Amino acid sequence: MGTGRLKVGLAGVGHLGKAHARILSQLPGVELVGVADPMIDQARAVADERHCKAFDSHKPLLELVEAMVVVTPTRFHHAVASEALERGLPVFVEKPLASTSAEALRLEEAARSRGVPLQVGHIERFNPAYEALRRRLFRPRYIRAERSGPFTGRSLDIGAVLDLMIHDIDLVLDQARGAEVVRVEAMGTSILGGHEDLAQARLVMGDGLVADLTACRCQPTPVRQMTMWGAEGFATLDFATKCLRFVEPSEEIVQKRIKAPEMAAGELASLRETIFQKHLVPGETACPGPHDALTSELIDFVAAIRQQRAPRVDGRAGRRAIQVAERIIAAIAEHAWTGNPDGPRGPHGLPALSKEAPRRAA
């Protein structure tokens, strides 16, 4: 790779693709050569704004660039990324990496055989709050995450698991440090007639870590939060505000020298008054970064190309997240809503309560 400006092409200029185009057109050392979208008028509008070329297909763009960014609907990720990788081009693909883990594995292997970076857009890895947590000495034993928001009308070719929960699956796998998922329990329902719009999953890892994940894309108030606890403390991450809150236990707590059930009334009163000053000390860290997370991950992509190294979130990470997502989706499909194995199952099986049915007494 030369030392001049890196020539980059962008496939897909929908809602998120426009953000990628804006950032790529402003990144130092990068030239956004062109954007491609079958909706050519939209491609031309973005190209005019970003001073690059417009195409109605990614194919001619592949001949003009040194790297590709793929922000198409998920069902096209594999096809577009495959063609770019076959030409030996480094590729950034928005999450999820592909529609299936089989497709993701083929992309992973293609990148490996060509010796080029394949990066997946798991953006929360670049959230300053998560980066701050990762710098701490902390090994969580339990994780709870909620990722919910209003209906957007986008990403309807996949459900809430691959659309939203995939972010938190990736973070759980990152925190598990190589441990595999040994058990999955899940339930979910379709609210608007397609794939699941609401999903709840429990993951049990081989190293004992347990994670409860919730995703909903029909909730009025957006939520992007994760809590974790372990021997080193209790962490709460707000991905929207980029804030990390961490409660650290005192040495007396860690060494289990405090025995509340054995304390006299006066000792208990003192403990109650001082517990958050002496023993469970909360701290809050606002984590402003020099860039937003989308910019940071594109900077990492460019750096991986220039330095000939693996990106922070590579093809293997993207494939592993999809494999877990597929197990969750399969568990959702098998969930028996009434407990009867012969009764209604899956995301379209949630039985409605009859209007005539009497309510149980409290």
Image (tube, rainbow, N blue to C red):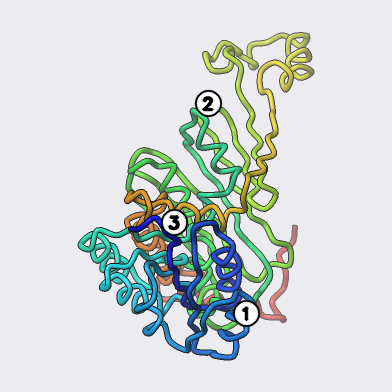
> In which quarter of the view is residue 340 placed?
bottom left
62 to 120, vertically: above or below: below
Residue 133 in view of the camera: yes
Q: Residue at x 54, y 41 (%)?
A: 131
> Secondary structure under badge 1?
loop
Q: Residue furthest front?
A: 4
Q: Residue at x 52, y 73 (%)?
A: 196
Mark 2 is surrounded, within 10 Å at the Cα level, by few (under 14), some (14 to 19) or many (20 or more) other residues, namely some
Observer-side mark, 1 or 2, equals: 1
Q: Residue at x 49, y 89 (%)?
A: 38
The span from disc 2 to disc 3 (Cα, nearest Å) is 35 Å
The span from disc 1 to disc 2 (Cα, nearest Å) is 41 Å
Nearer the observer, 51 or 90:
51
First of labels 3, 1 by sequence position: 1
First of labels 1, 2 by sequence position: 1
> Secondary structure under badge 3?
helix
Q: Which residue is mark 1?
A: 153
Q: Which residue is mark 2?
A: 232
Q: Are marks 1 and 2 in contact (CB under 8 Å)?
A: no
Q: Which labelled disc corresponds to residue 133?
A: none
Kind of residue at disc 1: Gly
Mark 3 is surrounded, within 10 Å at the Cα level, by few (under 14), some (14 to 19) or many (20 or more) other residues, namely many
Q: Which residue is mark 3?
A: 302
> Secondary structure under badge 2?
loop
Kind of residue at disc 2: Glu
